């Protein structure tokens, strides 16, 4: 699975959805608290522009002082609110520029990002995860179909691979976790050592939604077994702190 191709595909899906919205829908509340649909797209445009700046070694977008990432991005969105058509055009330009920058970047080099420097493929994976999660925020309140796709494999990998970081943020020692997830076409995706004492089984879409904080583990049918699996689901995240 080519991450750059899949990132483009996720952005294309969102573009097709946004194309069909009228101004009233753009100005309606999204699933992101305090943000309209337009605000969500402003945020995606800004973070895509940050990708281009990061690859160009201009990491000023993440110089936040004492602010958290959430506080910083909210201030940035509020400062850049604009008419829906302007927001949409800005996002489309930023999408194409960010994917082009990542494709052209040195694949072995790490570029500054919110929590830690990332290689282009991993940074592209975080962009796919963010567009997917905010796609949920856009389509959910509007009642628009947004089916799971095989691209969730990238997001599930991201959530599992960053579990050590998530455990550390929670003040816990990382523990090995085995995940066996079922994809949208009933395929099986496995991550981590199969002999681990703790394991998570179930639907990949639910796993990714827990990691995006769009569901809590108790709202899913995910099965956590072993001493650390429940905690892994509680700390799981597909995004920077």
Image (spheres, helix red, strand yellow):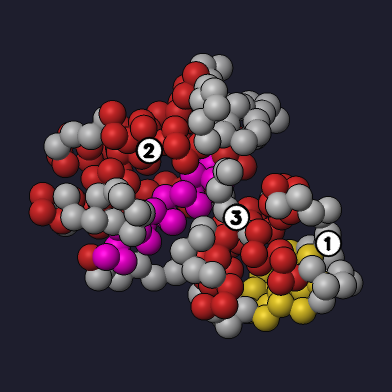
Magenta highlight: main SS: helix
Residue of label 1: 176
| Residue 136 falls inside the magenta stretch | yes
Residue 13 is at least partly visible in this image:
no
Give the quarter of the figure containing the C terminus.
top right
State the image quarter where residue 179 is shown: bottom right
22 on left or right of 236: left
Residue of label 3: 237
Q: Tag 2 or tag 1, which sits nearer the N-term?
A: 2
Q: Tag 3 or tag 2, which sits nearer the N-term?
A: 2
Residue at screen point 40% across, 29% down: 49
Q: Residue furthest front?
A: 66
Q: Is residue 4 above or below residue 60?
A: below
x and y percent of residue 109 in the render?
68, 27
- Identify the element where label 3 is drawn: loop
| Residue 132 falls inside the magenta stretch | yes
Residue at screen point 25% across, 50% down: 36
Q: Tag 1 or tag 3, which sits nearer the N-term?
A: 1
Residue of label 2: 74
Give the magenta-colored segment's residue range: 124-141
Q: Are marks 3 and 1 in contact (CB under 8 Å)?
A: no
Give the quarter of the figure containing the N terminus.
bottom right
Mark 1 to mark 2: distance in Å?
34 Å
Q: Is residue 97 above or below residue 142?
A: above
Q: Are marks 1 and 2 in contact (CB under 8 Å)?
A: no
x and y percent of residue 121 in the render?
60, 41
x and y percent of residue 162 in the render?
69, 51
Q: Are marks 2 and 3 in contact (CB under 8 Å)?
A: no
5 on left or right of 26: right
Q: Judge by depth and name the residue closer to the eye, 230 or 159.
A: 230
Label 3 Cα neighbours within 10 Å, binned few <14 / some 14-19 / many ≥20: many
Q: Judge by depth and name the residue closer to the eye, 146 or 7.
A: 146
């Amino acid at each position: 699975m080519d991450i750059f191709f899949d990132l483009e595909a996720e952005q294309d899906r969102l573009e097709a959805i946004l194309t069909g919205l009228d101004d009233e829908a753009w100005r309606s509340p999204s699933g992101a608290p305090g943000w309209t649909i337009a605000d969500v797209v402003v945020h995606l445009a800004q973070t895509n522009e940050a990708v281009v700046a990061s690859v160009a070694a201009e990491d000023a977008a993440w110089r936040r002082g004492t602010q958290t990432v959430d506080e910083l991005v909210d201030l940035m969105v509020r400062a850049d609110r604009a008419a829906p058509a302007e927001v949409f055009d800005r996002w489309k330009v930023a999408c194409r520029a960010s994917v082009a920058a990542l494709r052209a970047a040195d694949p072995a080099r790490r570029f500054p990002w919110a929590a830690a420097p990332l290689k282009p493929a991993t940074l592209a994976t975080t962009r796919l995860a963010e567009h997917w999660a905010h796609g949920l925020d856009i389509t959910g309140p509007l009642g628009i179909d947004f089916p799971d796709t095989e691209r969730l494999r990238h997001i599930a990998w991201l959530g599992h691979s960053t579990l050590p970081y998530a455990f550390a943020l929670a003040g816990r020692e990382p523990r090995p976790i085995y995940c066996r997830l079922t994809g949208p076409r009933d395929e099986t995706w496995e991550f981590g050592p199969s002999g681990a004492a703790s394991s998570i089984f179930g639907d990949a879409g639910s796993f990714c939604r827990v990691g995006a904080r769009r569901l809590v583990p108790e709202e899913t049918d995910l099965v956590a077994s072993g001493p650390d699996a429940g905690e892994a689901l509680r700390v799981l995240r597909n995004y920077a702190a």
